[in-house]
Image (cartoon, rainbow, N blue to C red):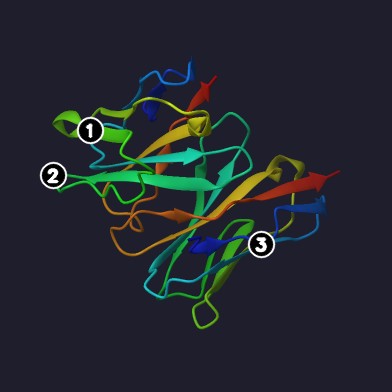
């Protein structure tokens, strides 16, 4: 039973534009939400996180927005760069619980 | 290096054989996780060790899968009587403490192919 859903398997964006990756979840007990980035043949690397007490967290070009009432979060990358091309995984957990991952969205940033 | 180390990086085995996958977490990290990623799928949670607590085994797909963590450090994931559907990349991760307060650091995974 997929508790974290990324409904767009792929996304293509032009360099310099904004990339918006979306994620929905079903478990209202989730307290922590994270985004991971994965290049081929490597493990996922942590990108940015947000706790349920916030609705926005920003780190450089990356911003995560959380809408708890809609059980939805999104990752904004602006401006997008070709090096951002990777698979992005959304993840969520209850406090001290295991992370539940979505199936990922493959982002391609074209020059 | 100081990252999570997994071995082997690749493993090809015949159906029915047992395999052991090893994970060396980052020193001092109390939490250790095993996930797997099958072709075209997301990261599937398998098992989670947190300190001295009983592991959360809720993600193990069958009783052919088991894992242990010795001395609170190295972990071994064992798959008995492997099947072709076990073919996947098995990822280990560790974190300093609990999930949300400390992001997971992943190894590069073990690619398991069952022929």
The subunit letter for the residue under badge 2 reads: B
Q: Residue at x 41, y 75 (%)?
A: A28
Q: Callout 1: few (<14), some (14-19), or many (20+) C-alpha neighbours within 10 Å?
A: some
Left or right, residue B71 beside residue A87: left
- CA separation, marks 1 and 2? 12 Å
The answer to whether dots 3 and 2 both sit on one chain is: no
Report which residue position mark 2 lands on. B52
Expressed as whole percent of the image width and height from the top left, the position of residue A94 reads: 34, 65
Q: Callout 3: few (<14), some (14-19), or many (20+) C-alpha neighbours within 10 Å?
A: some
- Which is more N-terminal, label 2 or label 1? 2
Rendered-image quadrant of the C terminus of chain A: top right
- CA separation, marks 3 and 1? 34 Å
Q: Residue at x 51, y 42 (%)?
A: A45
Left or right, residue A56 beside residue A11: left
Report which residue position mark 3 lands on. A7
Element type at mark 3: loop
Mark 3 and 2 residues: CB-CB less than 8 Å, in contact? no
The answer to whether dots 1 and 2 both sit on one chain is: yes
Expressed as whole percent of the image width and height from the top left, the position of residue B65 reads: 33, 35
Element type at mark 2: loop
Whether B111 is drawn above or below A57: the answer is: above
Q: Nearer the viewer, residue B20 or A109?
A: B20
Left or right, residue B31 beside residue A16: left
Q: Nearer the viewer, residue A15 or A20?
A: A20
Q: Residue at x 72, y 49 (%)?
A: A107
Q: Nearer the viewer, residue A110 or B71?
A: B71
Mark 1 and 2 residues: CB-CB less than 8 Å, in contact? no
Element type at mark 1: strand
Disc nearest the viewer among 3 and 2: 3
Report which residue position mark 1 lands on. B68
């Amino acid at each position: 039973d997929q508790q974290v859903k990324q409904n767009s398997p792929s996304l293509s964006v032009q360099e310099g534009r904004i990339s918006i990756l979306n994620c929905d979840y079903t478990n209202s007990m989730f307290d922590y939400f994270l985004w991971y980035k994965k290049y081929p043949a490597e493990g996922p690397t942590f990108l940015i996180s947000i706790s349920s007490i916030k609705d926005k967290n920003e780190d450089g070009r990356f911003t995560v927005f959380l809408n708890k009432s809609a059980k939805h979060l999104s990752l904004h990358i602006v401006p997008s760069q070709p090096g951002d091309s990777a698979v992005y995984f959304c993840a969520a957990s209850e406090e001290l619980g295991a992370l539940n991952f979505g199936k990922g969205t493959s982002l391609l940033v074209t020059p | 290096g100081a990252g999570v180390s997994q071995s082997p990086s690749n493993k090809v085995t015949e159906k029915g054989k047992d395999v052991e996958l090893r994970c060396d977490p980052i020193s001092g990290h109390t939490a250790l996780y095993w996930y797997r990623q099958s072709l075209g799928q997301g990261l599937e949670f398998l098992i989670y060790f947190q300190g001295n607590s009983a592991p959360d085994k809720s993600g193990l797909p069958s009783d052919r899968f088991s894992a242990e963590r010795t001395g609170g450090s190295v972990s071994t994931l064992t798959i008995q009587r492997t099947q072709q559907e076990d073919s996947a990349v098995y990822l280990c991760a560790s974190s300093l403490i609990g999930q949300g307060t400390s992001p997971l650091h992943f190894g590069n995974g073990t690619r398991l192919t069952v022929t």
